[in-house]
Image: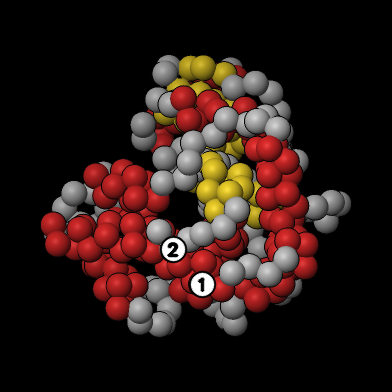
Amino acid sequence: MSPEEAVAVACAAFGLDPGRAAVLRAADHVTVALDEDHVARVIPAPTDDDRRALAAAMLLPRLLQRLDDPVERDGALVVAYPRTTPGLDGIADLAPAGASLAAHHAQGLLLLRQDAVDLPVFDPVRLAEHWLDRAPDVLDRDQRSALLGAVDERWALVTGEPAVLHADAHPANWFADEAGPWLMIDPEYLSIGPAVYDLAPLEVVERRLGTGPSRFPSHRAGYEDLAGAVDAAALAAAIGTREILSVAWLAARAADPATAGHVRDRLADALAGRPGSWRT
């Protein structure tokens, strides 16, 4: 489903004028601004995993809560949310995000022990394959094999107690709510996996794509204040997994030769462990 088709589906679901709507984020799911106060997440061809994640998200207070039940329209699920302004630009101390993530994991662990949620296990290799299949010409066979092998190898070292993962808690998916706990938005990959992985998305973005000193230390400190110290080796493996996975994500969106070149450069950097910014 194209972003334009997602706008049409979202507006048709609620009887709104598509001329006044706009795409905010186009990924596997598409986020559409319906008006000044509401957005809709459009889930094309929803799977059982998508439906299970939507049900589980309603039980987790650190996730932005939807406004109503999902609406089925033209083979898609359309889910309405209050419109927020996510992102952490201009905020130096990310300890509140870390504390909120720790609280999310604690609540998720309680739900898991009560068998109150039914979620898939997070599988980064399958996710990487899914993204690479959408862009078969960006990487050659050897590069694809190296990417998938690196994800598999690093993920095997990500250990720790299972948690309900947001699995994509990078800076743009945080809403710094001044009135209460910070919230995570877009739980597109809500799943079960080692809790430490949820620290990795923010670290990778801060280090590879940030414009200043990394704010990850404050994020980690806020998390550890509530959850206890994380295992350094498991965290390093989680960060390595996420870094490689982000390359596969970019490959799926490489619509021009320049972006495809960035994908190959980033893969080479990540596999070799070369430091440095990925900003272009």
According to the picture, the residue beneath numbered tag 1 turns out to be: 233
In percent of width and height, residue 149 lies at 27, 60
Residue at 29% across, 68% down: 267
User: Does residue 241 appear anywhere in the picture?
Assistant: no
Residue at 40% across, 82% down: 275
In percent of width and height, residue 94 lies at 71, 68
User: Does residue 248 appear anywhere in the picture?
Assistant: yes
Residue at 35% across, 82% down: 274
Q: Earlier in the sequence, mark 2 or mark 1?
A: 2
Query: Which secondary structure lies at badge 1?
Result: helix
Q: Is residue 271 left or right of residue 16?
A: left
**Quadrant location, the C terminus:** bottom left
Q: Is residue 19 left or right of residue 279?
A: right
Mark 1 nearby-residue class (10 Å; few <14, some 14–19, many ≥20) = few
Residue 7, placed above or below residue 161: above
Residue 237, placed above or below residue 36: below
The answer to whether the residues at label 2 and label 1 have Cβ atoms under 8 Å apart is: yes
In percent of width and height, residue 182 lies at 75, 54
| Type of the residue with mark 2 | Leu
Residue at 34% across, 45% down: 126
**Quadrant location, the N terminus:** top left
Separation of marks 2 and 1 at Cα, in angstroms = 8 Å
| Type of the residue with mark 1 | Ala
According to the picture, the residue beneath numbered tag 2 turns out to be: 157
